[in-house]
Amino acid sequence: MTISSNMNNEAPKLDLFSSEFKEHAYPFYSTLREREPVYRFTLPNGQIAWLITRYKDAQAILKDKRFIKNPHTLLSREQINMMFPTMERDLLLNHMLSSDPPDHTRLRTLVHKAFTPKMIEGLRGRIQEVADTLLDAVQSKGKMNLVDEFAFPLPIIAICEMLGIPPEDRNQFRDWSDILIEAFNRPEKIQQARPTFQSFIKYMNHMIEDRRKNSTEDLVSALVHAETEGEKLTEKELYSMIFLLIVAGHETTVNLIGNGVLALLQHPKQLEKLKKHPELISSTIEEVLRFSGPVELATNRWADEDVQIYESLIRKGDMVVVALASANRDETQFENPDLFDITRQNNRHLAFGMGIHYCLGAPLARLEGEIALLTLLRRIPNLHLNIDAETLKWRPSYLTRGLIELPLVF
């Protein structure tokens, strides 16, 4: 993968969505951090943006109020329509990750109570039960696809139970999630995914109407009836927030588990160390999040005013993309950043972001990751890849970093 200079005001095309990019991303990021840490490029949809790759710059931008999340504030209707057709825009851009204060504060407050460390810790027993049940189903086979048979069902069961989604509909939500994530920031994919958007919205409509009539103890009921400072969620916000919770509530953990198991298998000394010292599980999870985190890029931001970074002038209205995966391998922040070390100390990675948009579900993802890895290694300690690691494929996705499959034998 080559880097084209921006010296002539060009914006080279960069396909951040492709599996090929994921395979070569880390060396590419390393070169950018050294040569052009604020990199102007063109997305496949024609959108020009800036890619931020150094840790200190990423950290600063994630907390900087001059970089906003709601594009409606800055962009024309034509620009918005080019990126997101109306129906899809309503679903993708009306949740807390695409909003700024005071809307962001109001939206986050409405769901915060469900994701406090105390509430999440109360789920430990159920998550452990699910992990054991999933391994019961595969242990006698001697092999499994970790993604399909363990890494996906564990968090999807947890978030679906929190939201009140019936067990028979979980796989449908996985299909919807996969399609919608791949369509993000890709107009041509959004058009193809339109039936998926319609099916999702139709399902949500039925579910919301049911909760209005028959309120239960689940999170969807809480959102339907939520009120803070005299305000409820609008219809668009309700759909968009449920969509965010379903996707973010499992996608991060699927990749955390898959990427974590792969990293351990590729570093057998670290794997043996964790087997002998399970008390290292917390620092192991943090190192997985840093070394091969589940989120490649932070969600889009736009400059609310002209901002100078080094020699680059980011103009008002420009889109900015923070490469979390690159920041977490920055040589100036982490000693031996390309070394996977489960005993790493002071591991201040940016895998869950920073600032007011710091991931609300981080405690849940950490708990699920810890239980998943410890249970897997306790129940099936003799794990091996059932495929050449060089042939593993990364999912073609803009924001996330996760494997399509991870075949294992034991």
Image (cartoon, grey):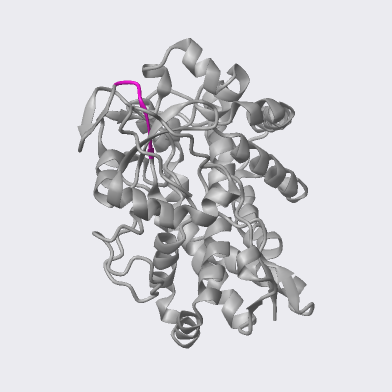
Q: Is residue 319 magenta?
A: yes
Which residue is at the front of the view, 192 or 343? 192
Residue 337's place in the image compared with 159, above or below, is below
Which residue is most to the top?
77
Residue 307's place in the image compared with 81, above or below, is below
Q: Is residue 342 magenta?
A: no
Q: Residue at x 63, y 51 (%)?
A: 161
Q: Is residue 265 left or right of residue 55?
A: right
Q: Is residue 360 left or right of residue 189?
A: left
Q: Is residue 66 left or right of residue 126?
A: left
Q: Is residue 401 visible?
A: no
Boundaries of the magenta span = 316-321
Q: Residue at x 41, y 80 (%)?
A: 279
Residue 276's place in the image compared with 39, above or below, is below
* Coordinates of residue 76 in the picture (x, y in percent): 43, 12
Which residue is at the front of the view, 387 or 359? 387
Q: Is residue 297 visible?
A: yes
Which residue is at the front of the view, 217 or 56? 56
Which residue is most to the bottom?
276
